[in-house]
Amino acid sequence: MASVLNSAFYLNSSNFKSIRVRTHSLASPLSLPLTRRRLTIKAAETDANEVKPQAPTPDKAPVSGGAGGSSFNQLLGIKGAAQETNKWKIRLQLTKPVTWPPLIWGVVCGAAASGNFNWTLEDVAKSIACMLMSGPFLTGYTQTINDYYDREIDAINEPYRPIPSGAISENEVITQIWVLLLGGLGLAGLLDVWAGHDFPVVFYLALGGSLLSYIYSAPPLKLKQNGWIGNFALGASYISLPWWAGQALFGTLTPDIIVLTLLYSIAGLGIAIVNDFKSIEGDRALGLQSLPVAFGAETAKWICVGAIDITQLSVAGYLLEAGKPYYALALVGLIIPQVVFQFQYFLKDPVKYDVKYQASAQPFLVLGLLVTALATSH
C-alpha cells in the first residue's frame, strides 16, 4: 500500500499548487486545494496591459484522448481533461480525486503514530471511514469550492473547465459544496461516537479544516495570494491535519505531536514552493507574492530546499534526543537521496526539472513521514 500511496503522492504533488489565484482534513478540509492551477496570462496586445476575459469557446477545450489520455484525466480531475456531458462525471471532476491519496496517507500516519491501531475488522473499517471523510468528502468540498471562487479566472485561462464552460450550473455547484461539507462533518461526528470520544475532536478538526479551506479560496482573506501563509497552509493541510484526525481516532492527540507535525509542515511549505517557479511571470502580473516573485528565483530555490531539508533534519534530531536513534538514522537515510536529487535536478533549473525532481525525491519524504509516525508510536 505504501508504494501505491507514494506514487499517488507524487502525481498530486506535481500539481501541488496549480491552484494559485485560480487559485490540499482539512485543507482539504483535511486538505487545501491541492491542484493550484497556474495562470497563463494573456496580455492584451493593445495599449492597455489588461487581462481580458474571453468567452468559453470549443477550440479552447483539450482534445479528447484515449482511455489513458484526457478521458483518464477527466476522471482524476487534472489538467488536460476531456469535455464531458455526463453530470456525475463532471461532479467527480470537480472533486479532483487525484488530490485524495496524500490525505489518505496522512490518516495512515496518524493511525500508526497512535500506537493503538490493530488489524481488526473494526479498526480497518474506522480507518476507511476516516479516509472517506478526509478524501472524497472534505477534500472534494475544498476542491469544488476552490473552482467556484476561481470561475472568473478559469473563464480566461481554462474556459473548458466545468463551471465556466457551462457544463454544470453554479447552483448545482453550490449544492455539491453543501452536500460534501455536511457529509464530511456528519461522518466526522459519527467517527467520534464510534471511537467513544467524550469531546468530539475529529468533528472539530474537520470543522476547523473546512473553515481554513474556505478562507484559503474565498475573499476577502484568500490566503493563497500570500506565498508564506498560503504555502504553509498547504503544507499543514497535507501533513498535519489528516495525521491529527487519524491519531485522534485511534488514540490521543498530544501537544508534542501537534508541534512535531506542524514542524514537518514547513517541509510541506518547501514542496509547495517548487511549483511557484513555473508561473513567476503570471504571479508578478497579477500582484501575487509567491516566494520566487518576492525574493527572486535564485534565492527562492534555496529557501525551498532549506525548508525541506532543515525541517527533516530537525525532526531526526528530535527523534535522536527522544532516545530513538534507529528511527533518526532511518530518517537521515531518507533525507540523503532527496539532497542528491535537489542538486542533480532542482537547483540546476527549478522550472525545467521540477517534475523529475518531485518524481525522484518526494517518495523519500513520504516514507520519512511514516518512519516518524512509527517512531512516535513507541
Image: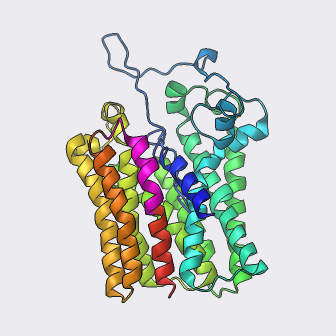
Residue 44 versus residue 295: which sits nearer the camera? 295
User: In this rendering, would 244 be left or right of 70?
Assistant: left
Q: Residue at x 34, y 37 (%)?
A: 351
Task: Give the main secondary structure, helix, strand or loop, of the magenta stretch.
Answer: helix
Q: Is residue 362 rendered magenta in the image? A: yes
| Quarter of image, res 195 | bottom right
Where residue 306 appears, x then y in whole percent?
A: 26, 58
Residue 46 versus residue 240: which sits nearer the camera? 240
Q: Is residue 34 visible?
A: no
Q: Residue at x 53, y 31 (%)?
A: 154
Q: Is residue 296 rendered magenta in the image? A: no
Instruction: Quadrant for the N terminus, please.
Output: bottom right
- The magenta segment is 350-365
Colouring method of the image: rainbow
Position above or below: 208 against 272? below
Residue 137 versus residue 338: which sits nearer the camera? 338
Q: Residue at x 37, y 39 (%)?
A: 353
Where residue 146 appears, x then y in whole percent?
A: 55, 45
